[in-house]
Image (cartoon, grey):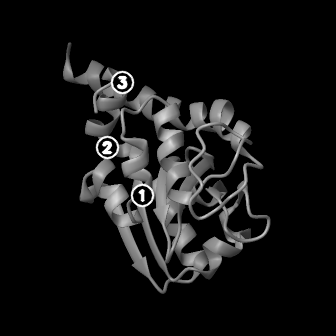
């Protein structure tokens, strides 16, 4: 009922969402084949495209999203559909190490990342106090070898490192999005 209580609930939700995806949802999807038009709703059955993977996982996590419409959007539009522009950061031509330092400084949590021609999740884990001790994971339906859903350290993933364009949106920082998730609102 107070602002402090509301902020505490939103912080807990911001910690819970990455754990939900990491522990309860992502593992079932690892190994699901990628295809450009893949649209399965079941892990390891059929195939799934990158945008549809992001939309499906958010839907399975409890977000009220139009999975097919969201999954068909390019990454900037997908992110604008989910969150306000103030929670997004765009870089162009940055070396991977510089980009990852910036993401680590932004903090632990769940991000959506749009690349040149791809989209996936960034999950930042590790130390609460020391940004340099945080690990940035890239979870996506990969069109490159091994051509399936995979979780890799971002700096070791070919799709991620080859991209010059990187747009990230920190989903867990947006109170409006977190409230919509908590209350089951579209």
Is residue 172 shown left or right of residue 143? left
Image point (31%, 21%), residue name: 183
Cα distance, mark 2 to mark 1? 23 Å
Place of residue 12 in the rendered image (x, y in percent of width and height, measured from the top left): 44, 26
Above or below, 12 relative to 41: above
Is residue 39 shown left or right of residue 182? right
Check disc 1 and report the residue beneath it: 72
Callout in the foreground (2, 3)? 3
Element type at mark 1: helix
Cα distance, mark 3 to mark 1? 25 Å
In this orientation, does residue 96 appear? yes
Image point (60%, 44%), residue name: 40
Cα distance, mark 2 to mark 3? 12 Å
Callout in the foreground (2, 1)? 1
Checking the image for residue 182, the label placed there is 3
Which is more N-terminal, label 1 or label 3? Answer: 1
Callout in the foreground (3, 1)? 1
Is residue 60 shown left or right of residue 140? left
Element type at mark 3: helix
């Amino acid at each position: 009922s107070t602002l402090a209580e509301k902020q505490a609930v939103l912080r807990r939700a911001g910690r819970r969402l990455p754990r939900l995806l990491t522990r309860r949802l992502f593992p079932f999807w690892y190994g699901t084949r990628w295809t450009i038009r893949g649209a399965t709703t079941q892990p390891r059955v059929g195939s799934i495209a990158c945008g549809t993977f992001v939309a499906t996982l958010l839907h399975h996590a409890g977000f009220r999203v139009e999975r097919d419409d969201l999954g068909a959007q390019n990454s900037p539009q997908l992110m604008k559909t989910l969150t306000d522009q103030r929670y997004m950061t765009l870089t162009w031509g940055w070396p991977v190490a510089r980009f990852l330092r910036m993401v680590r400084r932004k903090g632990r949590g769940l991000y959506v990342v749009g690349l040149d021609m791809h989209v996936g999740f960034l999950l930042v884990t590790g130390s609460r106090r020391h940004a340099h001790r945080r690990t940035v994971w890239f979870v996506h339906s990969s069109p490159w070898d091994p051509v399936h859903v995979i979780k890799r350290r971002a700096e070791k993933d070919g799709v991620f490192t080859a991209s010059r364009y990187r747009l990230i949106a920190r989903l867990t920082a947006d109170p409006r999005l977190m409230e919509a998730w908590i209350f089951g609102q579209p």
